[in-house]
Amino acid sequence: MQKLLVEGGKRLEGTVRIGGAKNSAVALLPAAILADSPVTIEGLPKISDLQILGDLLEEIGGTVKKEGQTIEIDPSEMISMPLPNGKVKKLRASYYFMGAMLGRFKKAVIGLPGGCHLGPRPIDQHIKGFEALGAQVTNEQGAIYLRAEELRGARIYLDVVSVGATINIMLAAVRAKGKTVIENAAKEPEIIDVATLLTSMGAKIKGAGTDVIRIEGVDQLSGCNHTIIPDRIEAGTYTILAAALGDGILIDNVIPQHLESLLAKLREMGVTVEESDEQLFIKTSEKLKSVDIKTLVHPGFPTDLQQPFTSLLTKAYGTGVVTDTIYQARFKHIDELRRMNAHIKVEGGAAIVAGPSLLQGAKVKATDLRAGAALVIAGLMAKGITEVTGIEHIERGYEDLVEKLTNLGATIWHEKMTEEEVEQFQNS
């Protein structure tokens, strides 16, 4: 096992290029199951989750060829093979195999998925959608069994705005008979990206990106070429880093409109933000002003940027309140930031950050993907060296992190953990 060592206190500058969207990619690969000929997806991020999804596609009979950031998936020989255990449980996004396999084969067996531990994230809205389309859904020995004689379009109202449920129902509905209407649908850019792929395959989808999506089912979908959108969360993470330490950082391959809620808060803090078509220029201020944030469904402030933003607030003057309305358990990074001398307390569903704090290097543990990003940012801001364990979480969502940060002038490197450190990590 490895850990990350981060030497703090350096100002950063230069250019960083953003990769393809993780939250799109993990749905786009399973969506290829629905086609009857090869699907090519370009601009993919280099992250471990996609390796797992590629392996699962091969497990059910697909042919997967990967070259650089491009993947070609030939689904023509795929079968409805049960996936109750193994790799399917390693990441939460494997639940997209439910909608895709149900849409193509009218049946699926998928092990209940894992991924980051962010408290309860039930899939009841997914199941509600599948049942409305005509599927029988049962939970048997830790796996979800889906069976349908045929799928028929339906009107489905989501009780909770859910990206995962919106995409999963879309995947199942594109080959159902008749018309499906998804109301109270999520509006994230990743949903538009998946709808664009499906439309290129021959699906009939209207309203993606609004709260009502209309789908006219088709009998057959064909392969296509698709280029993924940039990752707005990776872009947001580097934007926050630049706001903390940037002497002028250019963030390339970004869609600024996807980050409007974050950029508004950074301007409020006194950060220099300049936008162009596919780039952002960010420069920190000598005296950042604290702000309050509340996470909301898109286009509100993203829950995935709450943790990195909390690290930034430790540098700002005044008191900032961070409220997470999406995942109320998403404050596990707070104890780790406290180890680094941050003045933060959690009250109910909010973290109260008093600043500025002079952060000190410490030994900290990443408990999930975005907590890991928050700790790396804190380590770069801190005096001394910070050791971050649990970096497998970070590698699930940030491609070439060490290389990108080093190119900006950061001092950060991997180091192998000792047997004693591994034991302590596994017992903690």
Image (spheres, grey):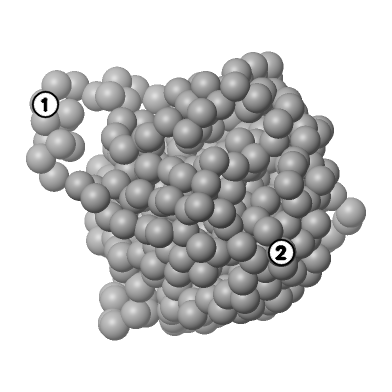
Q: Indicate the position of residue 66 as horizontal and vertical percent values.
A: 64, 19
**Is residue 271 toward the left or the right of residue 134 in the image?**
right
Q: CA distance from mark 1 to mark 2?
A: 60 Å
Task: Judge whether residue 213 can be spotted in this image.
Answer: yes
Q: Nearer the viewer, residue 373 or 343?
A: 373
393 over 191 or under it: above or below? above
Image position, residue 79 (x, y; %):
51, 28
Q: Which mark is residue 340?
A: none
Mark 1 Cα shell of 10 Å, populated few (<14), some (14-19), many (≥20): few
Residue 129 in sight = no
Give the camera-side residue of 367 and 20.
20
Q: Residue at point 13% right, 45% down?
A: 428
Q: Amino acid at mark 2?
A: Gly
Circle nearer the N terminus (1, 2):
2
User: x and y percent of residue 290 in the render?
Assistant: 53, 77
Q: Which residue is mark 1?
A: 420
Foreground: disc 1 or disc 2: 2
- Which residue is denoted by mark 2 in the rendering? 178
Q: Is residue 191 left or right of residue 276?
A: left
Is 65 located above or below residue 222 in the figure?
Answer: above
- Residues at circles 1 and 2 in contact by the CB criterion of under 8 Å: no
Q: Residues within 10 Å of mark 2 (few under 14, many from 20)?
A: some
Farthest right residue?
A: 277
Residue 34 occupies quadrant: top right
Q: Quadrant of residue 243?
A: bottom right
